[in-house]
């Protein structure tokens, strides 16, 4: 049960944030033309910028929570609403250079379930976080090196088979070697990636009435995996603004728990990318995906994407893609996705953006899922170091398989303030 003092502090924080005129996310503004950050701290030839986010969010499907004062073996089998606070201290380090360029961005995120809407939720408050490191060596030369690492802990997992109420710990390290013979008209980039992802439920108890893996605390670990990818990307710019693009990749995935067989999936696509007019850019690729493991599935791969430049500060993007990927418990899945994105910058300070996507996911076997997502909201730069905004997210997921975690609708509204020194 939430104590009165805790509830009062939570309401005070919510009220304080609601009075701020909109909260935004600095990391999402890099493509808008807005300059983010203060002077920072000088580090060599670069700058270190401490950042701080404070966000209040209403989430209609925040997780599975135990009833107040109930320490029994089960929790509700329905996703419950909650008011959630996000407190995110972070940093951004940029060290530019002609030979070596380094970019590091990250934050720690304390997710506090306030107990205002579902009193039993407070015990599931937890830490999340993100860190991105990119190092480029000799990026303007004929032979370069690119090193990267992406770390993320979040309740929005990368596995399409798992629904809400699950935490994901993901890390991937990458190495690439861009080759640019002949002045850069031809670019060939071999890359290798190694990643892992581990899952755990937000609630440590078994949801009543749940008999499927996506909400069973003992079952989600069967989706844990190790991933090794090796790929080769090629680009030939045969016209000043148009290129032939080729992409080949092998993915080897094994699962640390459960009985899912290892996967060895090949992707091979080729097509064109470039401008068809001063305002329209198009990417069109076609290819094939094949699993050489025990699942032995295959699919036609495709991507068709168009971007229209409405003005120097406004763009609209529409596209369709089809992918084939490995997944725990089912072996493989095919994802047919249609998406629409729009963004505009008004007055050099106000950014309005909207993103919508529809996925039809076909798992090996009989399971079929549909996922719809909508994300809209404004962001405003009050000062160089202060950005605010708000947003609304809607998600609708349905499956022919049972389970509240993969059959639900989700409404989220948030306000956020970002300060960057």
Image (cartoon, grey):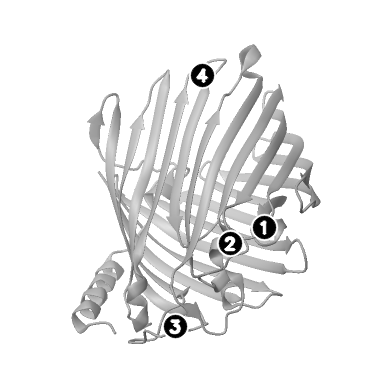
Packing grade of label 4 (10 A; few <14, some 14-19, many >=20) is few
Name the disc covering residue 373, or none.
Answer: none
Q: CA distance from mark 3 to mark 4?
A: 60 Å
SS class, disc 2: helix
Q: Where residue 155 sits: x, y (%)? A: 46, 62
State the residue lying farthest toward the top. 182
Of the image marks 3 and 4, the number of the one nearer the N terminus: 3
Q: Where residue 259 sits: x, y (%)? A: 65, 60
Say which quarter of the image contains residue 378. Answer: bottom left
268 versus 198 height, above or below? above
Q: Are marks 3 and 4 in contact (CB under 8 Å)?
A: no
95 versus 115 height, above or below? above
Residue hosting label 3: 73
Between 190 and 245, the residue placed more toward the observer is 190
Residue hosting label 1: 260
**Residue under the point 68% across and 52% down:** 326
Residue hosting label 4: 140
SS class, disc 4: loop
**Residue under the point 62% across and 27% down:** 189
SS class, disc 3: loop
The quadrant of the image that shows the N terminus is bottom left
The quadrant of the image that shows the C terminus is top left
Between 128 and 20, the residue placed more toward the observer is 128
177 versus 399 height, above or below? above
Say which quarter of the image contains residue 13. Answer: bottom left
């Amino acid at each position: 049960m939430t104590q009165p003092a805790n509830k009062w502090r939570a309401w005070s924080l919510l009220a304080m944030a609601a009075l701020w005129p909109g909260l935004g996310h600095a990391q999402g503004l890099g493509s808008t033309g807005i300059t983010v950050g203060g002077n920072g701290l000088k580090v060599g030839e670069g700058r270190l910028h401490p950042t701080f986010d404070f966000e209040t969010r209403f989430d209609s499907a925040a997780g599975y929570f135990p009833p107040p004062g109930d320490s029994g073996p089960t929790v509700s089998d329905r996703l419950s609403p909650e008011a959630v606070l996000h407190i995110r201290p972070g940093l951004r380090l940029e060290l530019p250079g002609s030979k070596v360029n380094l970019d590091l961005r990250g934050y720690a995120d304390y997710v506090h379930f306030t107990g205002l809407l579902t009193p039993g939720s407070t015990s599931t408050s937890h830490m999340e976080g993100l860190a991105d490191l990119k190092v480029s060596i000799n990026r303007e030369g004929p032979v370069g090196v690119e090193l990267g690492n992406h770390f993320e802990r979040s309740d929005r997992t990368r596995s399409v088979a798992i629904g809400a109420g699950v935490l994901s710990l993901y890390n991937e390290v990458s190495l690439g070697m861009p080759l640019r013979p002949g002045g850069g008209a031809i670019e060939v980039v071999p890359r290798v990636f190694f990643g892992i992802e581990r899952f755990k439920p937000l609630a440590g108890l078994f949801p009543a009435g749940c008999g499927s893996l996506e909400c069973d605390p003992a079952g989600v670990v069967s989706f844990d995996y190790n991933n090794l990818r090796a790929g080769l990307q090629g680009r030939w710019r045969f016209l000043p603004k148009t290129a032939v693009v080729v992409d080949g990749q092998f993915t080897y995935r094994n699962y640390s728990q459960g009985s899912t067989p290892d996967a060895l999936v090949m992707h091979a696509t080729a097509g064109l990318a470039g401008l068809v007019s001063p305002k329209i850019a198009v990417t069109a690729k076609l290819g094939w995906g094949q699993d050489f493991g025990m699942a032995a599935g295959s699919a036609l791969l495709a991507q068709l994407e168009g971007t229209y430049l409405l003005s120097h500060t406004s763009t609209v993007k529409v596209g369709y893609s089809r992918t084939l990927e490995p997944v725990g418990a089912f072996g493989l899945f095919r994802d047919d996705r249609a998406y629409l994105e729009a963004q505009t910058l008004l007055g050099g300070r106000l950014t309005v953006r909207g993103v919508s996507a529809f996925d039809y996911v076909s798992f090996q076997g009989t399971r079929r899922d549909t996922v719809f997502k909508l994300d809209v909201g404004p962001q405003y730069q009050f000062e160089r170091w202060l950005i605010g905004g708000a947003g609304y997210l809607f998600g609708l997921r349905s499956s022919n398989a049972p389970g509240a975690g993969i059959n639900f609708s989700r409404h989220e509204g948030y306000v956020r303030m970002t300060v960057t020194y």
